[in-house]
Image (spheres, rainbow, N blue to C red):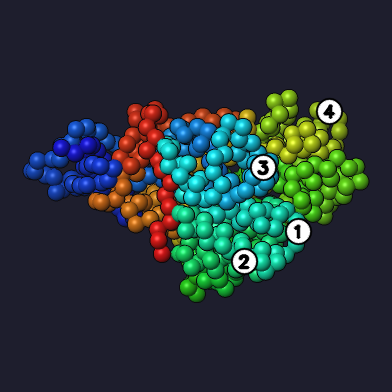
Amino acid sequence: MEDLVIRDADVVDGSGGPSYRADVVVDGGRIVSIVKEAAAAGCQRPRAMREIDAEGLVLSPGFIDMHAHSDLALLRDPDHGAKAAQGVTLEVLGQDGLSYAPVDDRTLEEVRRAITGWNGYGDDVDFDWRTVGEYLDRLDRGIAVNAAYLVPQGTVRALVVGWEDRAATPAELDRMRRLVAEGLEQGAVGLSSGLTYTPGMYARDAELTALCRVVASYGGYYCPHHRSYGAGALEAYAEMVALTREAGCALHLAHATMNFGVNEGRAPELLALLDRALDAGADITLDTYPYTPGCTTLAALLPSWASEGGPEEVLARLADPATAERIRHDLEVTGSDGCHGVPVEWETVEISGVTDPGLAGVVGRTVREAAELVGGTPWATARRLLLADRLGTTVLQHVGHEENVRAIMRHRTHTGGSDGILQGAKPHPRAYGTFPHYLGHYVRESGVLTLEECVAHLTSRPAARLRLPDRGLVREGHRADLVLFDPRTVAAGADFGEPRRPPTGIPYVLVDGRFVIEDGRRTDALPGRSVRRTPW
């Protein structure tokens, strides 16, 4: 007798085709049988040791988060209820060019400091790895959901070149190519970049193209956070399309959007650019989160010249009055490259988290509001916060446009990604609500996508990008990474007022055939493991 039968489910199988009613049988972590209602008429229905009555529920493949920042969260808290409760069964780590492998002791400390705002410093994590393979082995000790990994180009550059704004030497480029190749051989699925973050932003196109050629030779993909989502955004997208075309590498555009006032209503221009490339034979996909505000660190807004040399150099520049005034001018007048070439509007920058508990009083306020409390200027407040919190402050940037969000999520290569930062007292609700928000708001309430379309965007499309032959569809023989949700009630509980509130309408989530969410509650199961690159 099999392990489980999910009876009378409305199956939305991830293909984008129409739903059907069926009994789905799971055994040994895989889907072993699908008996459609018509075929079951007059026949003995499948039996199992356990049955779930799925009347009124949709059964779909587990959701794949194509852009996650859970690199330390999965180790700190393998229970990972933030994602499991949403129906996420696989997430892709190593994003935006900065993560924790491959490293040496020096680089590890530098990276920990640089992205404290994303993941915390990690005092409660045993950093007992240095290579990509060792990090993936660490995940294999047991986590709630599965995880894939991208080699982070900025970390590779920090390891080989350092944090200086200069071209790599031929010998350094050779070493970076070897490190990327080693990461892919050890299981990474591709390469990420953060081209508005140091030190990745210091790489010229020739350097990135050379690394992408390595990625292409292993059948991986390049996932850039490109050089601008504000002024010059279309040119930045075109740069990535041209670069990967020259390298012969697949391209996946991270959190693809058009932000700030300069890009209001311009999503159709981006989509036309991508469609021309796709029609010419390019291999391009993209992901988005279904919200208008973005989320990053306050330090990320600084100009690149001020960030050269690593965190300690940044703090020294901020402490020097003359240099700090130059930074202010770039931020408020010129338009910092860290702020996407757009002069910062402090009323759009909301403080979402601090690492120093003594600074908690500013969380939930914009920088302008925090400045008004003490009677100073926004820049003076931002500077004090950066110094006191040692660059660990996270912020929301309210710079997006709903019409752009809707247009991009309809695109033929769109997938879902939360870009979820789990740090801070008031994080972006996308970390806890992205996937039910797609299903509740953009399917049921707004009708931007049909249910079948949306499920395909969140399941089979990302599985195809990751080259996973047995995930992303409800099919016999596929892994039993599955979600049962109520299409009438599924919704993101998380919002900007209560960003950690759990979703509703998702009573069951299975990873590898084991319940991680059962009757709406987190179980103690840790069936997730690393998902490694399929050999080319």
Amino acid type of the residue that numbered disc 3 sits on in the rendered structure:
Glu
Residue holding disc 1: 165
State yes or no: discs 1 and 4 in contact (Cβ < 8 Å): no
Read off the residue under disc 4: 374
Foreground residue, 316 or 274?
A: 316
Rendered location of residue 498, percent (x, y): 57, 29
Looking at the image, which residue sits at the far right?
322
Residue 274 occupies which quadrant of the picture? Answer: bottom right
Q: Are marks 2 and 1 in contact (CB under 8 Å)?
A: no
Q: Amino acid at mark 4?
A: Val
The residue sitting at the left extreme is 42
Q: Which mark is residue 174?
A: 2
Question: Would you name the residue on which mark 3 appears?
Answer: 109
The N terminus: image quadrant: top left
N-terminal label among 1 and 3: 3
Between discs 2 and 4, the one toward the N terminus:
2
